[in-house]
Amino acid sequence: MTETAAVSGTRGTGARRGRPPQTPEQADEVRARIVAATASVFTEFGSRGLNVARIIERAGISRPTFYRYFPNAPAPLDVVLTLSNEGLVGGIRSALDRSSQPVELGIGMIDAYLNWARGHGPMLQPVFAELHDPGSPVSSYREEAFDDIRALVSAKFRALGRELPSPLDMDTALQVCEFVVYRLSMAAAPGGQPDPAAVAAARLTMIRSVLVTLGRREDVEFALTVPEIFPPAAS
């Protein structure tokens, strides 16, 4: 389930409040409904506005039912953020596994990052709003994802026999991707998706930045032969 699906599927379920699940499947459905409702509340109010009362109202369950599954409101948010991290890291891992050509690898990583962002829908704005807030759980999950991505990229560089990027270069590439997607999310209408033309332009910005930061001269020379990565010289 994507975060977008989680947000859209939380109202009007018609569930009977407080009724204990009778089967493992029903238990899984109730737990998933709580997680989806938590994503919806987080999208609207952020982590500081997250509480059990809002979650159970959105999920259509009773307070005792909630506490059968989670001890507090942050616990289902941990599930939401874990799924988010798994989506990002898993997408980048798949992109790195698909090719050994450095420029293709960079493009694949950028597309994986954009696909991850697109899957969040309106939840992306509060995620990015809290990335650098030490009091938000989003901040620690961001660092975990970055650690995993650093390890994946370093392992791929070793497999290709390339010198590892410096920590500064690696973090610069990650920060550029994060900043560009943040700009896209902030420019989108509330509850909507960014303009496709803006996404296409942002994608090129990310590709060029990562290529120059983490690539070699021969990578840039190869990229010059790929249409649209770099604009042609003015006539």
Image (cartoon, rainbow, N blue to C red):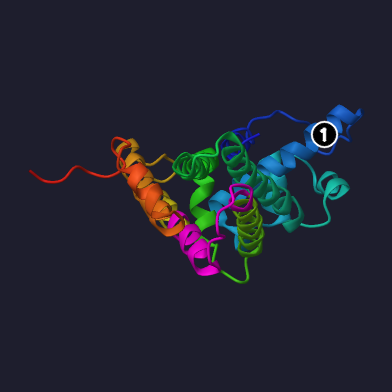
User: Would you place residue 19 above or below residue 138 in this image?
Assistant: above
Q: Is residue 151 magenta?
A: no
Outermost residue, left side: 235
Q: Position of residue 58 (x, y in %)?
A: 66, 42
Drawn side of residue 95 relative to residue 235, left or right: right
The answer to whether residue 60 of the structure is visible from this angle is no
Q: Main secondary structure of the magenta part?
A: helix
Front position in the image: 27 or 176: 176
Residue 120 point in image, percent of width and height: 54, 42
Q: Position of residue 162 (x, y in %)?
A: 55, 54
Q: Which residue is mark 1?
A: 28
- At mark 1, the secondary structure is helix
Q: How many marks?
A: 1
Q: Nearer the viewer, residue 11 or 184?
A: 184
Seen from this angle, which residue lies furthest bottom? 134
Residue 89 showing in the rendered view: yes
Q: Residue 204's x, y, as percent?
A: 34, 45
- Residue at horizontal 65 percent and vertical 42 percent from the top: 90
The stretch drawn in magenta includes residue 165: yes
Name the residue at 42% across, 50% down: 185
- Residue drawn at 73 percent across, 58 percent down: 74
How packed mark 1 is, by other alpha carbons closer than 10 Å (few <14, some 14-19, many 20 or more), is few
Amino acid bearing label 1: Asp
The C terminus sits in image quarter: top left
The image shows residue 96, relative to residue 15, as above or below, that is below
Tell me the residue at 11%/46% (across/down).
Answer: 234
In magenta, the rendered stretch is: 156-177
